[in-house]
Amino acid sequence: MGMPFVMLSSVAVVMFSKMGISDARATFWASLIVLPWSLKPLWSPFLEMFRTKKYFVVMTEFITGISFALVALSLPLPNFFTYAIALMGIIAFSGATHDIATDGIYMAELDASTQARYIGWQGAFFNIAKVAAKGGLVFLAGTLKNDVGIAHAWMIVMGICAGTMLLFSFWHGVSLPSGGAAAATIRSAREGWRSFVEVVTSFFTKKHILLYVLFIILYRLAEGLVDKVLQLFLMAPVEKGGLGLEEQMLGLINGTFGTVAFIVGSILAGYFISVRGLRRTLFVLCCSMNLPFLVYLLLSVIQPTGIWLIGSAVVAEYFGYGFGFVGLTLFMMQQVAPGSHKMAHYAFASGIMNLGYMLAGMASGLISDLLGYRWFFIVVALAMIPAMIMSRVVPFVHNDNQK
């Protein structure tokens, strides 16, 4: 689930920047290209009407793998940016569809208690893609560029993504459970439309739904602002307010130490929630998600040169991010999604979450360019506050320990 999203929303920024695309243009298109993850509620109801959830998982992994291969082949071309963005649009649609079906399998096969126990593992594996791609693959591109050139280095990276997705497609075709048959048998376009309207209406008539939507958007607002600008800040020259890291060092911090910190944080959070319940832990999880972003404000003020200090700050943020992110995922599964259209309604919630993340990312480069890195991170600090307040007062409708 994680690789297509991370490659498009974050790693593509680094690739385009190194291939001569401006920061503002790179951050704008990398944010816009993930729009299908926000629009997936538009077609998620139809996935419940046809085939099994497993069918859509396997099919979309195959399509994503082929599309990554085509992105790799487009990079040496004169108008590579246009071709790459178009192909990434296909990856985004396929990846968003894959997310809907995969989350549907998770919710269909596991009860609420088991969901809580293993949500940390699910979050860890999703975000391993984040740290492995932003770490390992960025490191690899930086290592190879001196030997084969920037374009061919990134061709290799995209080729690795293609091979990985195709491998998972074949493996999951054999190993995954079906996640249940289609929820409805549609015999005409009119029946399909009626079913779609019923799914949408039932979502927006849920109790407290407007409050839930606002909370979902605010929970990841600070992350949406930070995610793309952070890599540019870490790599920017010191005289321009950055820290001057090379791609190899950035990849090492993200891909090695950051990976361990994130996995530990995610797994511990899952067990923490399963013991105490989501209602009692949501505020702690929200603070853990947001407060570590303050380390980047500190780094922008003192601009240290010591790699251990920079690395420690990034690792602390990764641990907090891993610990806190699973709280929102489980909140959407257990408080927003329950009902007769669980898969579609979870897709609605996660689509709204990604819309807020996308809009914040689209604005982040412009804000950073206007204010500079230091004031940008002050804006991020202010963006944390509403989510932490809401996590104390957001109502719970469903029992978060239900078997």
Image (cartoon, rainbow, N blue to C red):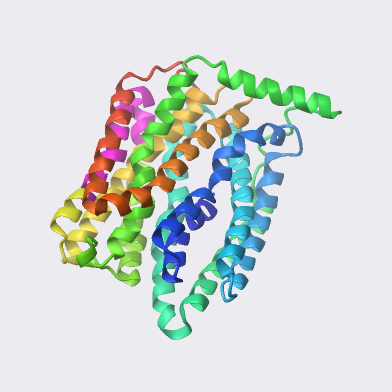
Residue at image position (45%, 66%) is 21
Residue 167 image-quadrant placement: bottom right
- Of residues 55 and 140, the one drawn nearer to the viewer in this rendering: 140
Please state if 294 lies on the left or on the right of 47 as rendered: left
**Total label count?**
0
Q: Is residue 375 magenta?
A: no
Q: Position of residue 340 (x, y in %)?
A: 64, 21
308 vs 331: above or below: below
Q: Is residue 111 visible?
A: yes
Please state if 396 lies on the left or on the right of 295 as rendered: right
Residue 132 image-quadrant placement: bottom left
Residue at image position (52%, 78%) is 152
Report the magenta residues as a range: 271-296
Residue at image position (40%, 38%) is 326
Q: Position of residue 234 (x, y in %)?
A: 28, 61
Q: Position of residue 32 (x, y in %)?
A: 52, 49
Residue at image position (15%, 62%) is 304
198 vs 188: above or below: above
- Of residues 40 and 342, the one drawn nearer to the viewer in this rendering: 40
Extreme residue toward the left, this view: 302
